[in-house]
Image: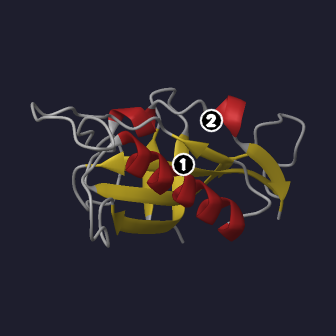
């Protein structure tokens, strides 16, 4: 049973089977949001997702970045990502038409950032998440 169903702009339905939410800047004791810190956070999320789902491709939705009107510190200008980092395991019908639809599914682990802790559902998911190129990124597997 899935946690939620997300409908892509292409019309394909995805089942969300696992979701990990974390605070983008949780645990940061020193410094400020900047490009080097953000790149370390993103790299850590990708490595973690690849380890958790080694047989599934991982895709990072490029996060929106804000540059508030503040001075640049020692690590460059302030660069802020949305406050919630998300890693989701998604499944859908098989990509290959000749695969038996009962025995095959497609899968992709997606990393994205969003402003709230709301679980994506239906057509209410973040636009960038709904625009993922499933056919180009996901991989079929046999049950």
Nearer-the-camera pick, 90 or 115: 115
> Which percent across, then down, holds residue 27?
32, 73
Nearer-the-camera pick, 24 or 70: 70
Left or right of 139: which side holds 39? Answer: left
Disc 2/disc 1 C-alpha distance (Å): 9 Å
Which numbered tag is attached to residue 134? 2
Left or right of 4: which side holds 56? Answer: right
Residue occupying image coordinates x 69% and y 36%: 137
Q: Closer to the observer: label 2 or label 1?
A: 2
Secondary structure beneath dot 2 equals: helix
Mark 1: give few (<14), some (14-19) or many (20+) Cα within 10 Å.
many
Secondary structure beneath dot 1 equals: strand
Q: Is 115 placed above or below 24 here?
A: above
Could you say which quadrant of the image residue 81 lies in?
Answer: top left
Left or right of 126: which side holds 93? Answer: right
Q: Is 123 placed above or below 25 here?
A: above
> Which percent across, then down, holds residue 8?
47, 35
Mark 2: give few (<14), some (14-19) or many (20+) Cα within 10 Å.
many
Residue occupying image coordinates x 77% and y 63%: 54
Nearer-the-camera pick, 20 or 120: 20
Residue occupying image coordinates x 38% and y 57%: 85
- Quarter that holds the N terminus: bottom right
* Residue linked to disc 1: 14
């Amino acid at each position: 049973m899935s946690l939620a169903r997300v409908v892509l702009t292409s019309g394909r339905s995805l089942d969300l089977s696992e979701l990990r939410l974390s605070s983008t800047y949780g645990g940061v004791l020193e410094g400020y949001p900047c490009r080097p810190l953000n790149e370390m956070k993103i790299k850590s999320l990708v490595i973690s997702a690849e380890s958790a789902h080694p047989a599934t491709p991982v895709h990072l939705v490029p996060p929106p970045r804000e540059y508030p009107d503040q001075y640049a510190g020692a690590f460059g200008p302030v660069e802020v990502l949305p406050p919630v980092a998300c890693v989701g395991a998604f499944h859908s019908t098989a990509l290959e038409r000749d695969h038996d639809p009962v025995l095959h599914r497609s899968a992709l682990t997606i990393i994205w950032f969003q402003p709230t802790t709301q679980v994506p559902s239906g057509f209410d998911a973040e636009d960038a998440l709904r625009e993922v190129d499933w056919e180009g990124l996901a991989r079929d597997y046999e049950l």
